Amino acid sequence: MTVLVLDGVSKTRGGGAHATQALRDASLSVAQGEVVLLEGASGAGKTTLLAVAAGLLTPDAGRVLLAGRSLAELSPAERRRHRARVVGFVFQRSNLLEQLTVWENVLLMALLAGRPSGEARRATNEVFEQLDIGHLAPRGSGELSGGEEQRVGVARALVHRPALVLADEPTGNLDGASGGVVAEALATCAKARGAAVLVATHDARLEPFATRRVPIVDGRLGEGRSPQ
Ligand SMILES: Nc1ncnc2c1ncn2[C@@H]1O[C@H](COP(=O)(O)OP(=O)(O)OP(=O)(O)O)[C@@H](O)[C@H]1O
Ligand SMILES: [Mg+2]
C-alpha cells in the first residue's frame, strides 16, 4: 500500500527578495516496506519536502496524500491528529521539551498518538532498548550530547509505530556505532512492521539499508534508483 503521495508539489520559502523556490513540481510515492533515501546538497529542498509531506508546511501547488487522506481537505486540528497518529518525524534539530525528562519526552509522543497509558509505557521502554539509550532515560533533555539527543529524537519518532517515518539527517551527529543502531532501527520499521520510511541524508552509511534512492537538485526530484 502507498502511504505517502506527493503529486506535483511546489513550495516557495521566504518572501520578497529572499523568496526561494524550494520545491518545483515534485512527485514521489513511498509504499509500505520501502526505505527511500532523499539525497541532495545543502539547500536542495530536503527539509522542505519532508515538512510538506508531514503537513507542517502547506504546498503552493500540488497535492499531498497521507495514508490515503488528502491533507488539503483536513482542518488544521484534523491534520494535527492525523499527523500524530500516522507520522513519526525525526527533525534535523531535535525539539525536546526541556521541562520533561528524556523518557517523558518519548512517552509523550505515544500518548499524543492516542495510545493507552500502559501500552505507551511499554512501547517507550521497548524503543529505549532498541536504540540502546536506556541509560539516558532519567536525564533532563538539556543534559545530552548532540549524538545522544539525536538518538532520543529517533526514539520519539518511532515509539508510536507510525505508518510513515520521515527522518531529516537522522545520523548527522552520530559516530559509526550509533549511526548503525539508528540505521537498523529505521530499516526494522520498514521490514518488520511495514512502515514507509523516507530519509533525507548525505550519509553514505545509510545506502545499504535503502530500497530506493531519489536525488533532489534545486527543488527538483530526479529518477529514483534502486541499489545495485
Ligand atoms: N524559512 C525560510 N525562509 C526563506 N528561505 C528558506 C527558509 N527555509 C528554507 N529556505 C530556503 O529554501 C531552500 C531549501 O531549503 P531546505 O531547508 O529545504 O534545504 P535542505 O536540502 O534541507 O538543506 P540542508 O541539507 O542544509 O538541511 C534553500 O534555498 C533555503 O535557503
Ligand atoms: Mg535540511
Image (spheres, rainbow, N blue to C red):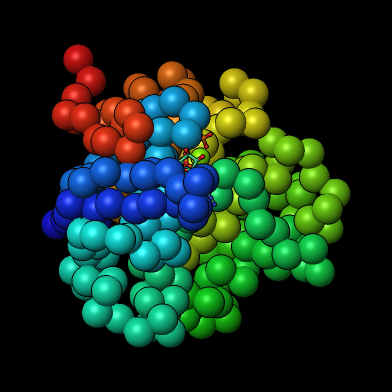
Across and down, in percent, residue 73 comes to 24, 79
Identify the residue at horizontal 18%, vertical 52% (top origin).
Answer: 8
- The residue at the point 26 percent across, 31 percent down is 214
Q: Nearer the viewer, residue 213 or 22?
A: 22
- Which quarter of the rendering shows the C terminus? top left
State the image coordinates of residue 149 (x, y, percent, origin top left).
Answer: 70, 45
Where residue 161 appears, as percent x and y from the top left, is 41, 61
Q: Is residue 192 visible?
A: no
Residue closest to the far front: 17
Number of marks in the image? 0
Q: Is residue 91 visible?
A: yes
Residue 162 x, y percent position in the rendering: 39, 61
Q: Is residue 189 above or below residue 115?
A: above
Q: Is residue 109 left or right of residue 206?
A: right
Q: In the rendered image of this protein, does residue 101 appear above or below residue 16? A: below
Q: Quadrant of the N terminus?
A: bottom left
Q: Quadrant of residue 23?
A: top left
Would you identify the image quadrant in which residue 198 lies?
top left
Q: Is 83 situated above or below 9?
A: below
Camera-side residue of 26 and 180: 26
Instruction: Residue 81: name its quadrant.
Output: bottom left
In front of the other: 108 or 124: 108
Please tell me which residue is depicted at 43% across the width and 55% down the height of the picture.
51
Farthest top residue in view: 228
111 left or right of 22 in image: right
Residue shown at 38% from the left, 44% from the top:
22
